[in-house]
Image (cartoon, rainbow, N blue to C red):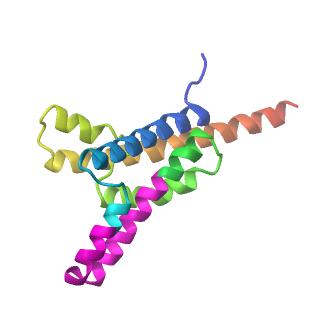
Amino acid sequence: MKNYITLRNVFYFWGMLDLFYIMRFIWLNIEQGRIPLIDDVLNFSSIFPQQGVYSLFIFILSLLLNVSIIFSSLLLLKKWKNAYWLIYFQTPLRVLFFIPSLSFLPWFFKTFSLPIGGLFILTTVISEVLKVVTISMAKESEVNTQEKGVESK
């Protein structure tokens, strides 16, 4: 039986979901007449004086996460073998800002008018655990496959 949980397939799956997130993010911004990320920076600069320094820290983390999702999508789709480091970096930020890697979940909840609250927190955590576990398992499987290939030679 062929093992379909390869690093290549796992990277492709999560890369496509990151790409979906990016496209949805751009679409939602354009739909509201906004320029993605640029309007965020401009709007933040106008509210920063009222919010204080803590908001700058949160805003930078949020901006960093959104930019890193662009890079993770590209790196995962190119199947760069070290992309998992970026995934591990993103995981706590995704949980902090409730941006699940299963990026269809917000759309799904909105489409079916499901109550978000605790369910969304739980699904975000599950989404991130699933992503880290599948990438770790696929990476481990790839290492084992390579070791077996070296031993058989």
The secondary structure that most of the magenta stretch takes on is helix
Q: Is residue 23 left or right of residue 146?
A: left
Q: Position of residue 41 (x, y in %)?
A: 35, 68
Q: Is residue 136 left or right of residue 58?
A: right
**Residue under the image location 39 percent in, 47 percent down:** 129
Q: Is residue 16 above or below residue 69?
A: above
Q: Is residue 40 above or below residue 78?
A: below
Residue 64, quarter of the rendered image: bottom left
Q: Which residues are magenta?
A: 42-69
**Residue under the image location 61 percent in, 19 percent down:** 2
Q: How many discs mark residues in the rendered view?
A: 0
Residue 142, quarter of the rendered image: top right
Q: Is residue 144 above or below residue 25?
A: above
Residue 151, quarter of the rendered image: top right
Q: Is residue 55 magenta?
A: yes
Q: Is residue 137 above or below residue 48?
A: above
Q: Is residue 57 magenta?
A: yes
**Residue under the image location 56 percent in, 45 percent down:** 74
Extreme right residue here? Answer: 153
